[in-house]
Image: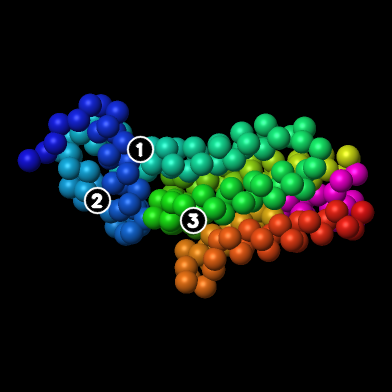
């Protein structure tokens, strides 16, 4: 028997079910019927709230990934005037990594979706995924530039190169954790990144 829920609860249940199944089986191997069974709703409910399977994928991406990256972006903007830009960068990367650790199943699923989107030009989220990660990389680079202008971050390293490196470090950690979770400890990874970023103050 299908459970009765209010509209917000039903929509959230569908999104959570779709995220888990997309993460476990991949987008193309997950059917609407599988999502309906997982969420304990009728197939017609998914059509009502989201329309097509592609629309559901966009809903999942917006609900989980955009919200997550949006939170990081808001934090960066909120601390843009913080005098120590290195500390802001360290805190952002800490948030990125530790949030992945606090919600492992959710983040593994969102990461798989992001990988699928980046690997296929036919994936409906390809451009959306690219733009979101590019925006966050630009935020990191902007913080580096602000720190260099304030003479708190070394000018010996190009800002764009450092922004790219930090983005790759965060994504690389997630990919490593996704692939070999037993080999990487989030707290230690944060300490390592803090140590590396802290060195920027010594290179001016």
**Element marked by disc 2:** loop
Q: Residue 191 location, x and y as percent?
A: 66, 61
Q: Could you tell me how far apart the alpha carbons at marks 1 and 3 are, in whole angstroms? A: 28 Å
- Mark 1 or mark 3: name the one nearer the start of the chain: 1
- Mark 3 or mark 2: name the one nearer the start of the chain: 2
- Mark 2 or mark 1: name the one nearer the start of the chain: 2
Q: Is residue 4 left or right of residue 68?
A: left
Name the residue located 40 percent from the left edge and 51 percent from the top edge: 106
According to the picture, the residue beneath numbered tag 2 turns out to be 31
Label 2 CA crowd tier, 10 Å (few <14, some 14–19, many 20+): some
Residue 55's mark?
A: 1
Name the residue located 59 percent from the left edge and 40 percent from the top edge: 72
Looking at the image, is 105 positioned above or below residue 150? below
- Number of numbered labels in the structure image: 3
Q: Can the viewer see residue 23? A: yes
Find out whether residue 124 is within the magenta segment: no
Q: How is the image coloured?
A: rainbow
Name the residue located 69 percent from the left edge and 50 percent from the top edge: 90
According to the picture, the residue beneath numbered tag 3 turns out to be 101
Q: Could you tell me how far apart the alpha carbons at marks 2 and 1 are, in whole angstroms? A: 13 Å
Looking at the image, is 117 positioned above or below residue 172? above
Segment tinted magenta in the rendering: 151-164
Q: Is residue 204 left or right of residue 59?
A: right
């Amino acid at each position: 028997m299908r459970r009765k829920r209010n509209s917000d609860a039903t929509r959230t249940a569908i999104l959570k079910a779709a995220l888990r199944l997309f993460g476990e089986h991949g987008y193309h191997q997950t059917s609407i019927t599988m999502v309906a069974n997982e969420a304990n709703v009728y197939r017609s409910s998914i059509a009502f709230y989201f329309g097509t399977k592609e629309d559901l994928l966009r809903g999942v991406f917006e609900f989980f990934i955009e919200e997550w990256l949006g939170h990081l972006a808001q934090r960066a903007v909120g601390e843009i005037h913080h005098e120590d830009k290195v500390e802001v960068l360290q805190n952002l990367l800490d948030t990125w990594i530790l949030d992945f650790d606090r919600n492992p199943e959710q983040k593994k699923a969102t990461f798989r979706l992001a990988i699928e989107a980046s690997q296929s030009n036919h994936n409906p989220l390809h451009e959306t995924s690219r733009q979101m990660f590019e925006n966050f990389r630009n935020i990191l680079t902007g913080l580096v530039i602000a720190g260099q202008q304030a003479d708190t971050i070394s000018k010996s390293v190009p800002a764009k190169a450092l922004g790219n490196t930090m983005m790759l470090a965060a994504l690389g950690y997630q990919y490593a954790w996704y692939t070999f979770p037993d080999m990487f400890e989030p707290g230690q990874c944060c300490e390592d990144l803090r140590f590396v970023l802290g060195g920027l103050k010594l290179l001016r």
